[in-house]
Image: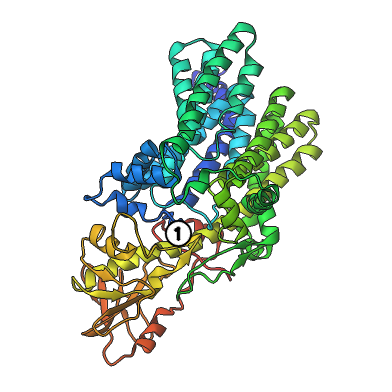
Amino acid sequence: MPQGGEGSDRIRRETSAIKAAPVAGILWDRLPLIFAVTNLLLLGWMLAGIRHANHDDLYFEIVAHNPDLPWTQVAIWAAELQQRTTHLFNVPIALVGVWIGSTWIGEWVYQAQLLAMGLLAFLTLRRLTDEAVAAGWLALTCGAFAIHYYFMAPPGYPLIGLFSPSLFLLSLYLLLRHIERPSPLCLAGSLLASLIAVGWPEYDFIIFTLPVAGILVWKTSGTRRRRLLGLYGGVWLIGIVFYASGKLLFPAGSDAARVTPSFDLVALAKTFLTLWPKAILPFGLVEGIRLAQQAVPGVPALPALITFHTVARLLFSDPAFLAVLLAWGGGFWLVLRKVCAPQGALWALLAAGIMFLLAPTAVLSLSATYQHTVLAGYIQGHLSSGVAQVGFATVVFSASALLASRWRSSLVCAPLALLMAAICVLSLGYNLLMRDALAANNQRWAAFHLAAQAIPAGSKVVAPTFWGNNGVSAVPATLPFGMANYWTSWAQLMEGRPLDVRRPDETPQDGYVHIAYAPSPSGAPLVLIQDSSGLMLLSQVPRNLGDWRASNWECGAYCRLNLPATTWEEAEKLLRTTEAGANGLLSRLLLNRDGAFGGLR
């Protein structure tokens, strides 16, 4: 017989093994969810710190901070401009989002919204399929999501832009809860969320209605089905009538064609075939995606046309991308091996993916305004591109899940997993390059903040490099509501400095202050100023530049380097720093999210 001590040890070991087995089993069962949440957090990290400043509504941030401009006036102006009754409530809501987005808390709110929306999508899809399918779909949707530089919403809009899809998901989730266990509260919440989601956006009413109708047909029958279809149909009719009422309530504004359909089939087809491939990254890279970077010193050395070759240069520069490919492949292989959802649910998911893939861009292509702007070459994408990307990921994953559930062999699951992993790695490389361009663009505002502190109040300022094109528009030289141009208004309202920044088309005169800037990979831009006292450089931190050492800088609230006996042309050469940006995967992922960017070698 074992001694007392030996017996106690054996019992403890057996007890620990028994306790560990359920824990290991639970962890194994939750690996798909852990994989999905990791991808969701990665997408949030890739979006963190990006100042969404490539949109022609950039001036809304100034409008939101103008104490002399009532928001009701802005809402009525926007409603009349586009004949859209919904602007009476969504413009004030957007201005709230813009105001929040320009504060330190804005990033946290955005990340919390993104996380909540991802988890809500997972919970909703899990009720329709199974946990592995829901987790795999979320993982691929987040991992394959391309952060397109060509059309990013302005500050604050992302906070608002997530509302519509969140309301759609909330409507689905509450409806499924009501179907499983009838609840007047869940039904009322679902109807209200669906009403707002349908009546709000300009191109998503199809994708916010058909999935709900499909679930009602699929999950209910008889009198209950007819009653619920009648309730939702009535709610949608109210939303559509409210949305369309602007055509009757307001005279045609200068931008009314944005929501006016044009049935020129040739123009519609050309618009669709221009916008849709650019939204889906693998297709967009075949033709190439235009990158409208501002031509100033210090911007990342990226070509004007981003192709597979451009992304491949980054992917093949660091073996870590291969490790990430294998990790993604392993995650998707595990998910596919665990899929046990009914075939009917997977086919329904595939159908929904096709609708998401095509419908928003097709509806957008009906717009007379977008037919003109797209075919004229002014834009190559739209905010609806994000919906198309979700549709693409849904189609790829649901098709893979269908094949994997039909043939359980690793010979089937492994290639499908590697295909999805390759799409994610391609998107990761592309997104890192887009972050470079976006972060460099962000530094324009940090540079202007430095300049505004150093320039005497009341100065007339010439700032040609601050007016450049990025994304789909330039910084606006004219503003509505009788406001001054963008940078003059920004200086007054956002910096608290009364400066007169001259428009880019004006000829400089004697006595004007000249400023220029250059972004740097560290996130700290350089600013060159020439005024009556001479030339100076400004930076957030001292640095070595040419023959000047860091010790030559005078630092307080900002760092200043006086450049005596130097011409403007000579000083401009100092803006062309040789500082190299991070190139490896890990170093890029660890860059600070306050304007730092990498380099492509």
Side of 465 relative to 556 (left or right): right
- Residue 81 in sight: yes
Q: Position of residue 107 (x, y in %)?
A: 38, 47
Q: Secondary structure at mark 1?
A: loop
Q: Residues within 10 Å of mark 1 (few under 14, many from 20)?
A: some
Q: Position of residue 142 (x, y in %)?
A: 57, 43
Q: Which amino acid does the dot numbered 1 rest on?
A: Leu
Q: Position of residue 365 (x, y in %)?
A: 61, 47
Q: Is residue 540 above or below residue 548?
A: above
Q: Is residue 157 above or below residue 435?
A: above
The N terminus sits in image quarter: top right
| Residue located at (54% from left, 72% from top) | 301
Q: Is residue 216 above or below residue 161?
A: above
- Residue 42 in sight: no
Which residue, as the protein is rendered here, is positioned at the far left? 457
The colour mode here is rainbow
Instruction: Give residue 297's quadrant in the image.
Output: bottom left
Instruction: Write down the residue under mark 1.
Output: 591
Q: Position of residue 128 (x, y in %)?
A: 62, 23
Asked whether 126 or 60 is in front, the reply is: 60
Instruction: Give residue 226's quadrant in the image.
Output: top right
| Residue located at (62% from left, 58% from top) | 375
Asked whether 583 or 246 is in front, the reply is: 246
Which residue, as the protein is rendered here, is positioned at the far bottom? 565
The C terminus sits in image quarter: bottom right
Q: Report how many numbered discs are placed on residues in the image.
A: 1
Q: Is residue 207 above or below residue 298?
A: above
Asked whether 516 or 18 is in front, the reply is: 516
